[in-house]
Image (cartoon, grey):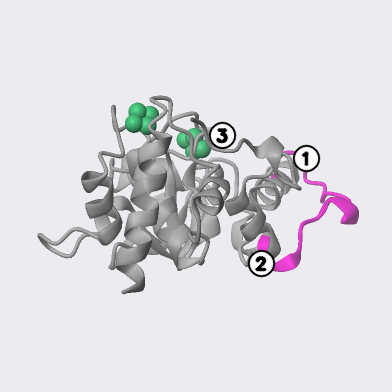
Amino acid sequence: MIFHGSGSTSEPDVPPEQRTKALDTPAPSRRAVLKAAAAGTAVAATGVAAPAAATPPAATAQAYAVAPGASVEVAMTVNGRLRKVVLEPRVTLLDTLRERLGLTGTKKGCDRGECGACTVLADGERVKSCLTLAVMRQGAEITTVEGLARGEELHPVQEAFIRNDAFQCGACTPGQIMSAVACIDEGHAGSEAEIREWMSGNLCRCAAYQNIVAAVADAAKEVRR
Ligand code: FES
Ligand code: FES
């Protein structure tokens, strides 16, 4: 039993969650941020401004073009708490969460956008935190798996994963749970097929898919009540 691979969709190489993001992405792309940083580096190194065609949008350049090796302060609300970190613009949200804020519940699987283990919510939308630079999330509300429970009370999705035995080694589980929370919130948990499609960006090397799908369907019923 496997999730539908990305090849089964009308947009073969883009998982559903990324398709959603592509439609209404407010934050600058990682490419834009890196280009802005690179432009700053080139100017500093050569004293010559980059050609206009290679210059990123003004807002992006203003916000993110910094001197080589320089750091920027990023402020985000993480699990309801304002956190400020000073880091280089190239640091991913995933590394910021794990290594700077000590939130190791978010897992690093592939570190290149393929497995979904690093999924978190940014302003309520699921994102793969290994593909997102922290500076791109300036001012954002970030929710990680540590932020789902209310005290001793687990989130309905967490309860459903336990009830349905929806994990084996657990490496993918935080990402699966965060993705499931968003999947239900997006209204994409109406059937087993729909859950499989909209959870297809989260891989499970233990192949616990049958139980994961059952858990998401189960949680969706609870959330709708
Ligand atoms: S660690 Fe981010 S998608 Fe695999
Ligand atoms: S439970 Fe092991 S990778 Fe999913």
Type of residue at label 2? Asp
Q: CA distance from mark 2 to mark 3?
A: 21 Å
Residue drawn at 50 percent across, 51 percent down? 195
Residue linked to disc 1: 46
Which label belongs to residue 55? none
Q: Secondary structure at mark 1?
A: helix
Q: Is residue 45 above or below residue 56?
A: above
Extreme residue in the left direction? 152
Residue drawn at 12 percent across, 63 percent down? 151
Q: Does label 3 point to a residue whose CB lies under 8 Å from ligand 1? A: yes
Q: Which corner quadrant holds the C terminus? A: bottom left
Judged left or right of residue 127, residue 63 is right
Q: Which residues are magenta?
A: 44-60
Extreme residue in the bottom direction? 225
Which label belongs to residue 114? 3
Q: CA distance from mark 1 to mark 2?
A: 37 Å
Q: Secondary structure at mark 3?
A: loop
Type of residue at label 1? Thr
Q: Secondary structure at mark 2?
A: loop
Q: Earlier along the polypeptide chain: callout 3 or callout 1? A: 1
Type of residue at label 3? Glu
Q: Is residue 153 above or below residue 88?
A: below
